[in-house]
Image (tube, rainbow, N blue to C red):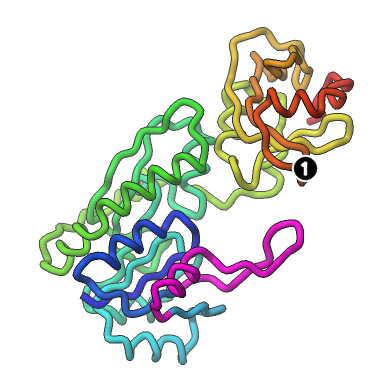
Amino acid sequence: MKIIFAGTPEITIETLKSIQESNHEIALILTNEDKPSGRGKKLTKPPVKIFAEVNNIEFKQPAMLKDKFLIDFLKTKEADLFVVFAYGHLIPEEILKIFKKGALNIHTSLLPKLRGAAPIQRAIINGDKLTGLTFMKMEKGLDTGPIYRQDHIEIDHEETSDSLEKKMSKVSSSKIVEVIDLIAENKLKLISQNNEFATYAPKISREETKINWSMKATAIASLINGLSPSPAAYGLLNKQRINFYLAEAVEKESLGPGKIVEVSKNRLLVGAKDFCVSIKELSRSGKKRQKYESFYNGSKQIFSDENFSS
């Protein structure tokens, strides 16, 4: 089949490779515009654009999808299937109607749970033990379409968004061609979602990234791991922003929310509502992420303040 693919971040690359290596043709790639990134705000290409350039695949970076010229251009490609994975835009109904075999979306949760923009992060923040991938037929609503197949993925102890994303990428790339083949042969049955069981995964807000040390230790550790590596949860110590990337709840008595219970070359324990949070990876704002032991060796003076402010 001729396929148009829409995606943007690194998680999609292995899936793109699998499609490219199959007997299906990628006629066009849609991806986001280049955006400023890093401390220097240098204009940076999205990973999917780089893939398209390296592999000589035609691509577009439309600012708007509700554009008559874009829609007419997509029609000229005469593609059979539209595959969407972490594209970052709502797809207008006018585009969904173009394709003979419809539009296939790869969503990183077990729908109808965690519909929305941040299902990987929210699953970890929520303390879930199980999540997965959903291959679904797109329709007008947000992640509401009927389901082709689902694959379950366990969330391990100290799982971060980064490590869970890698699991998702591996599963997606291993299943995508099989799903496309079955769609081509009309051999996949669609199962409607039960909207009564729907939950949502809205985009992470800036306010959520600052740690409230009055929460339970397990909730704080889940927040830190769920926001790792980006945008990163943080606390303030000696009026300096400290970003956290890996943490674990420890059943040791808290001396109060944000109170440093233990600081040594091997361990940093910070009090929460009930127990303590062990901080395992962290950084000063704008500095390189480090394991706690390395951070302590170079920055132990920062712990002269005994409290993280909430």
Would residue 224 be found to the left or right of residue 268 on screen? Answer: left
Q: Is residue 134 above or below residue 62?
A: above
Q: Is residue 54 magenta?
A: yes
Residue 101 drawn at (x, y percent):
22, 73
Identified at 43% across, 45% down, the residue is: 166
Other-residue count near label 1 (Cα within 10 Å), few / some / many at <14 / 14–19 / ≥20: few
What's the magenta region? 31-58
- Total labels: the figure holds 1
The quadrant holding residue 209 is top right
Left or right: residue 175 versus residue 275 is left
**Residue drawn at (37%, 78%) of the image:** 28
Quadrant into which the C terminus falls: top right
Instruction: State which quadrant residue 303 falls in.
Output: top right
Magenta region includes residue 188: no
Question: x and y percent of residue 21 in the render?
Answer: 26, 65
Tell me which residue sits at (68%, 18%) in the image.
273
- Left or right of 149? Residue 140 is right
Q: Is residue 264 above or below residue 162?
A: above
Instruction: Give the left or right position of residue 63, taking residue 214 as reference.
Output: left
Residue in the picture at 57% in, 73% down:
33
**What's the amino acid at mark 1?**
Ser
Query: Is disc 1 placed on a helix, strand or loop?
Result: loop
Q: Nearer the viewer, residue 219 or 133?
A: 133
In percent of width and height, residue 302 lies at 85, 27
Which quadrant of the structure image shows residue 299? Answer: top right
Residue under label 1, please give it. Answer: 285
For the residue pair 226 and 114, the one nearer the viewer reads as 226
Give coordinates of residue 64: x percent, y percent: 54, 79
Foreground of the two, 144 or 239: 239
Which quadrant of the rendered structure holds the N terminus?
Answer: bottom left
